[in-house]
Each structure stands twice: as structure tokens, then as C-alpha cells.
């Protein structure tokens, strides 16, 4: 199934300038994902449809946290950046059981 990924100009600008993340890296992370998707259930981050996230590596081995919303078969990217240790610990404890 082909990934239907939408990245707004504002999000792309933030990815490029703040996190040095490319669209290609995001697509690679979707292809390389191993664990389950986690739902961000923090009150200030709740959305409808829910915000989902995962951590995966690019083909070059760069680890990224991918945050998105999926609606009607389209993935709307919210952000992507290198995860911190807390995010890694949460993902590893909840995505692989």
C-alpha cells in the first residue's frame, strides 16, 4: 500500500529549519517501522482523529520520532525529530509488548 503523506508548508519549514528532517527520511521511517503505533493521550495533544506516533530509523540509521494524524487514508504529518531518552523509553516499553 502506497503511503499517502501530506506535509503542510509550515510543517515542512519547521522540519527543515528546526530539526533538519527531510520528507524522504519520514517516508523511510514509515517503511522501517517495527513496533506498534502509540496514541498521544495527553490532554493538550488530544485530537480527533487521534494523534499517533512511533520511533523508527531512516535507511541511514538516523532515529526519528514521527507524529501524525491519519484520516480517510491520508497521513497528515504533525512533526518529526530525533527522540529523547524519555520518548525512547516510553516507545520501547509500550510498542513491543
Image: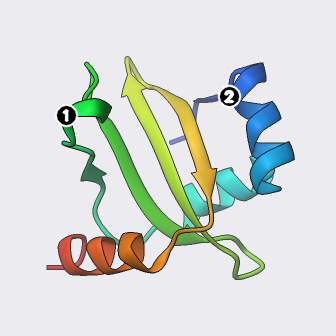
Examine the image and state in which quarter residue 14 appears: top right
Kindly identify which residue carries mark 2: 7
Query: In the rendered structure, which disc, 2 or 1, sits on the residue that comes first in sequence?
Result: 2
- Left or right of 86, for residue 13: right
Q: How is this picture coloured?
A: rainbow
| Mark 2 nearby-residue class (10 Å; few <14, some 14–19, many ≥20) | some
- Front in this rendered view, residue 16 or 77: 16
- Front in this rendered view, residue 36 or 10: 10
Q: In percent of the image, x 61 and y 51: which residue is there? A: 80
Q: Position of residue 3 (x, y in %)?
A: 57, 39
- Front in this rendered view, residue 1 or 27: 27
Kindly identify which residue carries mark 1: 43
* SS at mark 2 in the image: loop
| Disc ID at residue 54 | none
Q: In percent of the image, x 54 and y 34: which residue is there? A: 78
Q: Position of residue 90 (x, y in %)?
A: 27, 72
Q: In percent of the image, x 47 and y 45: which residue is there? A: 67
* SS at mark 1 in the image: helix
Q: Position of residue 87 (x, y in %)?
A: 39, 69
Measured Cα–Cα span from mark 2 to mark 1? 24 Å
- Can you say whether 62 is above or below 10 in the image? below
- Front in this rendered view, residue 88 or 31: 88
Query: How many numbered circles does the render carry?
Result: 2
- Left or right of 82, for residue 84: left
Q: Quadrant of the C terminus?
A: bottom left
| Mark 1 nearby-residue class (10 Å; few <14, some 14–19, many ≥20) | few
Examine the image and state in which quarter residue 21 appears: bottom right
Amino acid at each position: 500500500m502506497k503511503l499517502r503523506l501530506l506535509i503542510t508548508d509550515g510543517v515542512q519549514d519547521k522540519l527543515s529549519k528546526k530539526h533538519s528532517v527531510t520528507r524522504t527520511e519520514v517516508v523511510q521511517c514509515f517503511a522501517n517501522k517495527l513496533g506498534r503505533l502509540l496514541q498521544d493521550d495527553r490532554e493538550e495533544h488530544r485530537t480527533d482523529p487521534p494523534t499517533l506516533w512511533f520511533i523508527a530509523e531512516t535507511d541511514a540509521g538516523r532515529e526519528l520520532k514521527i507524529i501524525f494524524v491519519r484520516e480517510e487514508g491520508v497521513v497528515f504529518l504533525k512533526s518529526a525529530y530525533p527522540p529523547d531518552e524519555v520518548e525512547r523509553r516510553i516507545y520501547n516499553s509500550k510498542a513491543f509488548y
